[in-house]
Amino acid sequence: MASPTTVPEHEAEADDVIALRTPEGFRAVGPFYRRFDQVPTEAAVEYLEEAATPD
């Protein structure tokens, strides 16, 4: 899910951008999912650190 107006901005910064849907009037990701719980900041930081660590 992505805003159709921001996809070109992301494409200019990233090697590849995949957005399955880019609906007009897009405001937020959450409404497109049955369950979209918030992730605490500490958990998000931990996930990002794990992803950045080479295997």
Image (spheres, grey):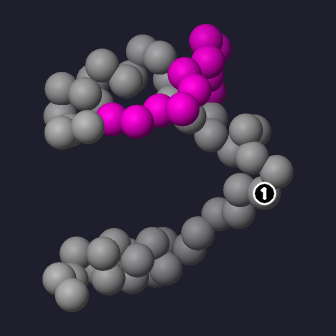
Residue stretch in magenta: 17-27
Q: Residue furthest bottom?
A: 55
Using the image, determine if residue 26 lies above or below residue 39.
Answer: above
Residue 22 magenta-highlighted: yes
- Could you say where residue 43 lies in the image, as x and y percent from the top left? 49, 79
Binning the other alpha carbons within 10 Å of mark 1 as few (below 14), some (14 to 19) or many (20 upward) gives: few
- Could you say where residue 21 lies in the image, as x and y percent from the top left? 57, 26
Residue placed most toward the observer, 54 or 46: 54
Q: In which quarter of the image is the N terminus?
A: top right
Mark 1, secondary structure of its residue: loop
Name the residue at 40% across, 36% down.
Answer: 18
Image quadrant assignment for residue 17: top left
Q: Which secondary structure class fits the magenta region best? A: loop
Using the image, determine if residue 9 lies above or below residue 55.
Answer: above
Using the image, determine if residue 37 lies above or below residue 53.
Answer: above
Q: Which amino acid does label 1 sit on?
A: Arg
Image quadrant assignment for residue 44: bottom left
Q: In which quarter of the image is the C terminus?
A: bottom left
Name the residue at 42% across, 15% down.
Answer: 5
Residue placed most toward the observer, 2 or 41: 2
Name the residue at 54% across, 22% down.
Answer: 22
Taking the image as shown, residue 7 lies to the left or right of residue 39, namely: left
Taking the image as shown, residue 36 lies to the left or right of residue 28, namely: right
- Could you say where residue 36 lies in the image, as x and y percent from the top left? 71, 56
Which residue is labeled 1 in the image?
Answer: 35
Taking the image as shown, residue 14 lies to the left or right of residue 46, namely: left
Number of callouts = 1
Taking the image as shown, residue 49 lies to the left or right of residue 33, namely: left
Residue 35 magenta-highlighted: no
- Could you say where residue 31 lies in the image, as x and y percent from the top left? 75, 39
Name the residue at 18% across, 26% down.
Answer: 12
